[in-house]
Amino acid sequence: MTLDHRLAALQGIRATLSVAIYPLQYTVNLPFRLADWTSTTLRSQQALIAQNAELRARQQELEFHQLRMAALEEENQRLRAMLQSSSRQWEQVLVAELMSVSYEPLRRQLLINKGSHHGVFVGQPVVDAHGIMGQVIHTSLFSSSVLLITDPRHNIPVQVNRNGLRTLAAGTGNPEQMEILYLPNNADIQLGDLLVSSGLGRRFPAGYPVAEISHIERDPSEPFASIHARPLAQLEQTREVLLVWPANPEEAKP
């Protein structure tokens, strides 16, 4: 050891032995290195999995809020269209939401969340952004029943927008079809003609869209033509309706 310390006589031998035993040392340390690498890799993988899960959750949350914003924007557009569609002489309006729909055969009736507490009255017209929907037939304090224009019990005075020809449009129970009553075979009416409310009886605002002629059949053996029309209001899709009052309170009397 004295010679090694002082003269470094054994350095070459020690270097040679180090090179010789290095593979053995590497082999002995390999399981520990492998275990450490595996542990580090697993921790990194678990961290990535957790991060990806958090990002997916955040993405779903953002997508949900985006869908909600889109739904709110669409609802605002519907409400703006409804408010802009009200006739000038029917100035006071109130938006109501559907609470339930009658599913009885041939019956077309809705329940809305506005009642006598809000000033709703029997006979009050109900519309949407596209046309007349029906009228109120019963009110309670905070809800009302609405009879749609397609109900078999409902008739509405209308006129052909093109020439002013007056007639009645009756419900058939079919949400896509109304029957036009008492028009002779030679009446000036055509497919696609727009029917608007005539205002007779002062129940509905005059000039408001009601339906569009969809079928005409003239049989010389019959006194009246068989005419059908398609309602313009979205009776089966809308979630909000518009209650309207006339500018003259006297016209609101049922």
Image: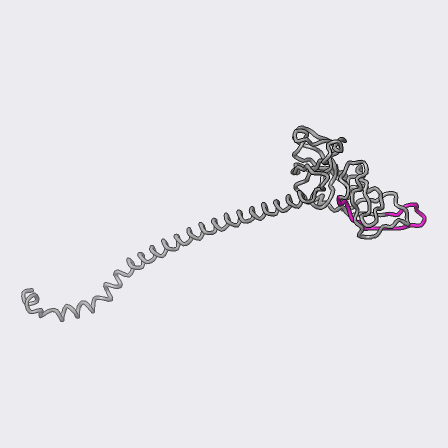
Pick the quarter of the image with the C terminus.
top right
State the residue in front, 139 or 105.
139
**Quarter of the image where one finds residue 174:** top right
Residue 11, image x and y in percent? 12, 69
Give the residues drawn in magenta, as a range. 208-226
Report the colour scheme.
Answer: one colour
Residue 158, image x and y in percent? 81, 43
State the residue in front, 192 or 244.
244
Residue 13, image x and y in percent? 14, 70
Q: Please tell me how many numbered marks the rendered image carries.
A: 0
**Quarter of the image where one finds residue 167:** top right
At 47% from the left edge and 49% from the top edge, which residue is drawn? 58
Residue 226, image x and y in percent? 87, 47
Q: Up-down: is 218 above or below 202? A: below
Residue 221 is inside the magenta segment? yes
Residue 128 is inside the magenta segment? no
State the residue in front, 90 or 36.
90
At 84% from the left edge and 44% from the top edge, which residue is drawn? 180
Image side of residue 47 versus residue 124, left or right: left
Q: Up-down: is 141 above or below 90? A: above
Image side of residue 208 versus residue 216, left or right: left
Pick the quarter of the image with the N terminus.
bottom left
Image side of residue 3 versus residue 180, left or right: left
